[in-house]
Image (cartoon, rainbow, N blue to C red):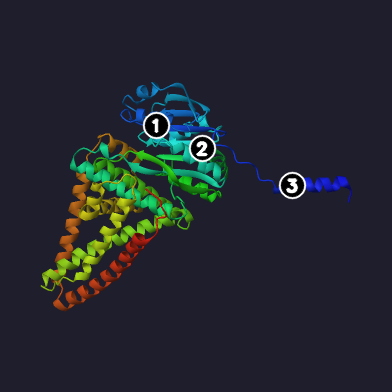
Amino acid sequence: MTPETLSLETLSLESLLTVPAKRRIQDVRVAAILPAYNEEESIAATITSLLAQTRPPEAIFVLVNNSTDETYFVAREFDGTHRATLRDIDYATTVTTIDLGDVPDKKVGALNFGWAMAKEFDYILGVDADTVLDRHCLQHLTAEMIDDSRIGGISAIYGFDQTVARGPLQHFLVRSQRFQFAGFNMDNLLRSRNMAVLGGQCSLLNVAAMRRTMAENHQDAPWVVDSEIEDSLLSLQLRSAGFRTKISAKARASVGAMTTIRSLDAQQVKWNAGGVELILEKPLHPNLRLRWRENLGMVANLASRVMFLALVAGALSMNAFQFAWWWSVPPVVSVLLNLRIATSMKGWTGRDVVYALLFVPGEVYMLMRGVHFVKAWAQVITRTERDNWAAQANAENGNGAGAGASWLLGVLGAGTAAAATAWGWIQLDVAWRSGLLTLGWTVLAVLTIVQTIAMLRKFVRRQRGFRV
């Protein structure tokens, strides 16, 4: 072996063992894209929060689409270059507002337009125009992305601004959504921070990973129009391409809450319908395990409550109802779990504790979610053609038909089913009714025990210092 050969072999070995130095947070370029539809009241706060970041983006593209209000003119006031010096590092952020006019593909069309403008950056921050970022949000997201090259996208921890609520109904809806998101976020944080869905409210995406998903799926753009929840499909594609989708341990953002029953109904039905389509199309995808659990859990929740009411009514009709103390155990465990969730939320208040202790508000909201769940499954199974994007947009802006007709039809349908069941029940002889009650209470007891154990597991699990 000659000295030259040894030198070359040594150099080759050293190059193999050398770990490339990680880029610093200021060495990467980040572009934020904000699809905005009739957001004149919130868009200024969103842009202001982006410009106030401890690590601001290099570019902000505000993409106004299908708007009929003053969103474009409010956002245009921020256009230009904004400079800041933070920790002796100079940053320059260019804000560009574009009115896209009528976009047939709505938010997806705006996102893909933003992709065309931002695809030469290292990372893209997708932000809804009613989201306000915590001052350190982008810094945490970028640092976590740089720290692990396997991450294709990372989402912030979402919370809700309680001050937007006006009146008892809005306070109930906003706080209920806060509990819903808190439980969802904690589940993801405790699963190695694996995130099934990178919510479009505030997520940082790796441009190189997005390019790979486009190539593997033969797409011209990252987001596609044939899904109700474009962020879920992109998350699945990133995972299928070998990248990780995560939830941040620190980054936070306050997102817009639905403040009317109609807008909440439209949003939840859209989310549920999109999720159902995905799990039916790709039932074994690892990113959809949590969605399967959510759907099965909702079936169990609805079944247990409907069975309990039906069995109590049947027992009362035969003067055979006797209260057993152990049926109070599940509600007590539910209250304890809600208390755990309440006190795990950052900035929790006494009102959150009262909400958890009262039990009834959580039950009412769960039943509302059950209605959304049933409507979504019915829509998918019956292949009903419905523009859920337009339905949500109209609901949020108070346009179109009200939610009263939909809820009235639901009440009438449930009432008719209950009446038919009651009529059938009284046609049975006593022996059959007694046997059915025995079987029903046994099945309900088993189902309730399983649900109670699941709640207890969540209640006693270590939260490892995470705050939602």
In primary-sequence order, the first of circles 3 and 2 is 3
Which residue position holds label 1?
A: 49
Of the pair 331 and 234, the residue shown nearer to us: 331
Q: What secondary structure is found at the residue carrying circle 3? A: helix
Position of residue 326 in the picture relative to residue 236 (left or right): left
Task: Identify whether 42 is placed above or below 463.
Answer: above
**Which mark, residue 14?**
3
Measure the alpha-carbon separation of dots 1 and 3: 45 Å
Q: Quadrant of residue 300?
A: bottom left
Which residue is drawn at the image coordinates 53% and 50% (left, top)?
240
Foreground mark, 3 or 2, reads 3
Residue 274 in the image, given as x and y percentages of width and height: 39, 48
Which residue position holds label 2?
A: 221
Label 1 environment density (alpha carbons within 10 Å; few <14, some 14–19, many ≥20)? some
Which residue is drawn at the image coordinates 36% and 21% (left, top)?
73
Measure the alpha-carbon separation of dots 3 and 2: 40 Å
**Residue 275 appears in the figure:** yes
Of the pair 332 and 381, the residue shown nearer to us: 332
Q: What secondary structure is found at the residue carrying circle 2? A: loop
Instruction: Work out which residue is located at the far front of the displayed protein and give it.
Output: 88
Q: What amino acid type is highlighted by mark number 3?
A: Glu
Q: What secondary structure is found at the residue carrying circle 1? A: helix
Which residue is drawn at the image coordinates 15% and 69% (left, top)?
314
Residue 381 in the image, given as x and y percentages of width and height: 35, 54
Residue 309 in the image, given as x and y percentages of width and height: 19, 63
